[in-house]
Structures are given as C-alpha cells and as structure tokens.
Image (cartoon, grey):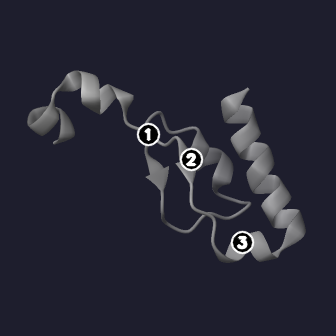
Amino acid sequence: VVADLYGREIADGMRMQYGGSVTASNAASLFAQPHIDGALVGGASLVADGFASIVGAASVRVG
C-alpha cells in the first residue's frame, strides 16, 4: 500500500514497529519476521526477567 501511494524507495526505507502483545515467549519469533523492525513492549516490561528476554531476542536481530 505504501509503495503504491509513495513509491518503492519510500516503502523500503520505512521501519515497522510491532504493536501487539510482545512476551518473552513470542519475542524471538516476532523479531525473526523480515518486516518487523522493533516492538512496542507494554506490560511485559514490568517483569524484569521477561523484559530481559525480550531485549535479548531483539539484540539477536540487530546483531
């Protein structure tokens, strides 16, 4: 849709933030998706160990 409206160059330069429920158990599979560049972490950020797992999964994606 973005490419149709604004062109491929603009679409390819966009970053997609996942806004659904991110948990320690699904973070790795979410960050493995090619078009998900980050996530908005809500309640899972209140549990330190779980949040650390989410950060770890994101770090693997970034390298």
**In the drawing, does residue 38 fall left or right of residue 7?**
right
> Residue 22, relative to residue 4: is it above or below?
below
Q: Amino acid at mark 1?
A: Arg
Report the amino acid beneath label 2.
Gly
59 vs 9, left or right, is right
In the shown orientation, is residue 62 left or right of residue 46? left
Q: Mark 3 sits on what residue?
A: 44
In the drawing, what numbered circle is on residue 15? 1
Q: CA distance from mark 2 to mark 1?
A: 8 Å
Q: Where is the C terminus found, in terms of image quarters?
A: top right
User: Are the residues flagged by discs 2 and 1 in contact, CB closer than 8 Å?
Assistant: yes
Q: Can you give x and y, in whole percent of width and height, for residue 13 in the image? A: 37, 28
Q: Relative to the observer, which residue lies in front, 3 or 25? A: 3
Q: Please provide percent x and percent y for residue 48.
A: 88, 68
Quick one: label 1 or label 3, which is nearer the N terminus? 1
In the displayed structure, does residue 61 sit left or right of residue 5? right
Residue situated in front as seen by the camera: 18 or 26: 18
Mark 2 vs mark 3, CA separation in Å: 15 Å
Horizontal and vertical percent position of residue 56: 80, 45
**Circle 2/circle 3 CB separation < 8 Å:** no
Residue 51: image quadrant is bottom right
Disc nearer the start of the sequence (2/1): 1
Q: How busy is the neighbourhood of tag 1: few (under 14 within 10 Å), some, or many (20 plus)?
A: few
- Numbered disc 3: secondary structure: helix
